[in-house]
Amino acid sequence: MMIFKRLTIEDKGTLEKFIYPYKFLSCEYSFTTLYIWREACDICFTIHKGALIIKKKDFEGRYYFMQPLGYSNENLKEIIDALMDYKTENNMHYLFKDLDEGFMEEISNIYDDVRDICIKEDRDNFDYLYEAEKLIKLSGKKLHGKKNHYNSFIKSYKYEVKDIKGEQVISDVIVAAEKWYAINEEDDDMLYYELQGIKDLLKNIEIVNIKGIAVYVDEKIVAFSLGEKLNDNLAVIHIEKADMDYSGVYSFINKTFVDRCFSDVKIINREQDLGIAGLRKSKLSYHPFKLEKKYIFSFSKCLVSDV
């Protein structure tokens, strides 16, 4: 019988022992991502047959497993069979979500004799991948508009960029996050949980080992961003918030954060758009070189509700 434990900050070492041998391009397999959304997604985990099993729910309240980490070729089928039993007993909607293409193909091959397999691309959760160098230089016709916005900001305002550390800057960021939430929340539970996640990250910033910058104009904070380097080639931008009253502020913090903190990596993951039209338009406007696909997998016929 599998017994799941709710994720806490004390579990960072345990999870990263399983996560870091992998070189995921997805933002999902990051302790920081899981920690931010642990309450919203009821994120729990267990160790079964030597593998890390993470159970969570999506923003529609549907439970599923992420792909197991640390399994062997010999025991993968046994692990999946046990998860299938748990899914049935607990009336879970999906078996797996957040799958990368390699794992999706691996389990498809194991169960290639099963007719009713549902495999779907989860477009709203595709991650946007960018070349770090292009985000820093903003060169070329495609990013000309972004460069103009950046230049507009630096010419229009007397600004200062500070690393997010120390009691005063952290306090300023919390105030800015609360202000941004108050303007944008519109009864959105997801944004409420995100705000709580931001506060928890800042409270434990030395433990989670993330980087962050805050942008000030005339000594008032107007933007901040938080992210982390996951491996030698990849960094993830977890949070980016700004006051839209300041022209060009998003272009400024986007470029400045990568240049200041992640210029030594090749790829920047700016996470998914969640199917939000405005967010999708914004992320596409930076011309990603790739959308990192994620898949949903279940042993059943695909229904309209699975889309």
Image (cartoon, rainbow, N blue to C red):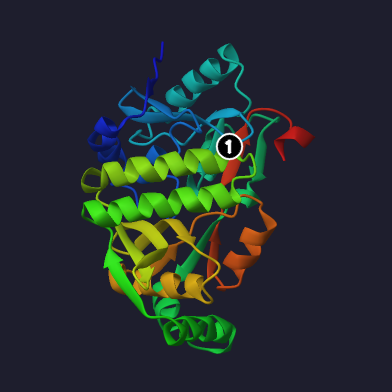
| Vertical comparison of 234 with 90: above or below | below
Q: Position of residue 281 (x, y in %)?
A: 65, 65
In this view of the protein, which residue sits in the foreground, 275 or 113? 275
Q: Where is residue 293 in the image (x, y as percent from the top left)?
A: 56, 53
Q: Position of residue 111 (x, y in %)?
A: 57, 31
Q: In this view, does 43 lie to the left or right of 302?
A: left
Q: State the count of labels.
A: 1
Q: Which secondary structure, mark 1?
A: helix
In this view of the protein, which residue sits in the foreground, 119 or 282? 282
Instruction: Locate residue 261: give its quadrant.
Output: bottom left
Q: Is residue 197 left or right of residue 93?
A: left
Task: Look at the image and tell me whether residue 159 can be seen.
Answer: yes
- Residue found 47% across the figure and 69% down from its top: 130
- Crowding near the residue tagged with mark 1, few <14, some 14–19, many ≥20 C-alpha atoms within 10 Å: few
| Vertical comparison of 275 with 194: above or below | below
- Residue found 23% across the figure and 37% down from its top: 13
> Which quarter shows the N terminus?
top left
> Which quarter shows the C terminus?
top right
In this view of the protein, which residue sits in the foreground, 94 or 249? 249
The residue type indicated by label 1 comes to Asp
- Residue found 44% across the figure and 75% down from its top: 252
Q: Which residue lies furthest to the right in this view?
A: 304
Q: Where is residue 248 in the image (x, y as percent from the top left)?
A: 52, 76
- The residue identified by callout 1 is 189
Q: Is residue 158 left or right of residue 156?
A: left
Task: Look at the image and tell me whether residue 30 can be seen.
Answer: no
